[in-house]
Image (cartoon, rainbow, N blue to C red):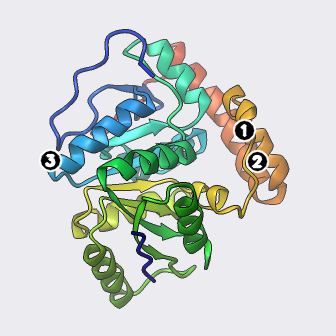
Amino acid sequence: MTISYAREPVGQPPVMPSPTEAWPLRTNILGVGVAVLTIPQALEQFDAWIAGGARQYVCVADVHAIMQSQWDPDFRKIHNGAGMVTPDGMPLVVLGKRAKIGPISRVYGPDLLIAACERSCARGYRHFFFGGAPGIADRLAERLHEQFPDLAVCGVWSPPFRPTTETEDAEIVAAINTARPDFVWVGLSTPKQEYWMRKFRDRLDAPILLGIGAAFDFHAGAKPHAPVIIQRSGFEWLFRLLSEPKRLWPRYRRVIPGFLYRVAQQELGLVKFPIDD
């Protein structure tokens, strides 16, 4: 289905890469190269990619994604092959600051979406929303259009909850390429959305694919969004756990202790976690 609708960083900013290159400043967090940047810098890089005709994908990484990369080397390679891996969780921001490479702040998927939409209104960028349960992408597009009346939403697509066939894949590619988006926002949850971006990156003409997971549900009003003060405190995981205990507790009881243990190993120099480029 297609819908059409008529800061300053602290310290010395890093040198911007050429339009088609990946963001150059990364810190190694358990073998994943996490970008050291702020939302304004990410938006500037998006401008450069669009102007330069790049074909990049962006992973929005939290602690769960970092640990998923520990358990799945192929998933780690997807992250390290991305044009940008943003620090979505506050623990990653804290570790990024310790690296002292450059200015860094939380580049959170839901916030990044809103910031990119606001910037797009003046630049005429086009957006396609792929993912979510039936009706979620439509509702997301409608809510964003209410907030940004000049936002150009060129399409939405809610895929089935099963592996797609080759015929369906061809239909998806044709629909997105015909819509000519600058941004394809992918909301399939981790790790499905990252595998989807790798699979379709070379088949899609859009300059930027972004996997933002739960941002679809948050901005569509399908799930409660943590208050800003909780987001900034680093305890959003607890808010989400209390909101969805049955789904998230099995994940968190494995992810959080494992992350803390491995970070301690890395910080003390007991174990090296090389980045697979």
Q: Amino acid at mark 2?
A: Arg
Give residue 86's position: percent from left, percent from top.
44, 38
Question: Could you say whether the residue bearing mark 2 is in a helix, strand or loop?
Answer: helix
Q: Which residue is at a point 54% across and 38% down the rendered structure image?
A: 88
Q: Is residue 222 above or below residue 48?
A: below
Q: Which residue is at a point 22% across and 41% down the rendered structure image?
A: 48
Residue named by callout 2: 240
**First of labels 3, 1 by sequence position:** 3
| Mark 3 vs mark 1, CA separation in Å | 36 Å
Give residue 198's position: percent from left, percent from top.
33, 60
Picture quarter with the C terminus = top left
Q: Nearer the viewer, residue 186 or 192?
A: 186
**First of labels 3, 2 by sequence position:** 3
| Mark 3 vs mark 2, CA separation in Å | 38 Å
Q: Which residue is at a point 69% across and 36% down the rendered structure image?
A: 256
Nearer the viewer's eye, disc 3 or disc 2? 3
Characterize the local packing of mark 1: few (<14), some (14-19) or many (20 or more) Cα atoms within 10 angstroms: some
Q: Nearer the viewer, residue 126 or 10?
A: 126
Residue named by callout 3: 52
Contact flag, marks 2 and 1 (Cβ < 8 Å): yes
Give residue 250's position: percent from left, percent from top.
76, 53
On screen, residue 137 versus residue 104, left or right, reads right
Characterize the local packing of mark 2: few (<14), some (14-19) or many (20 or more) Cα atoms within 10 angstroms: some
- Specify the quadrant of the image occupied by residue 178: bottom left
Question: Could you say whether the residue bearing mark 1 is in a helix, strand or loop?
Answer: helix
Q: Please count the marks in the image.
A: 3
Give residue 128's position: percent from left, percent from top.
40, 67
Q: Amino acid at mark 1?
A: Glu
Q: Is residue 199 visible?
A: yes
Tell me the number on the disc at residue 236: 1
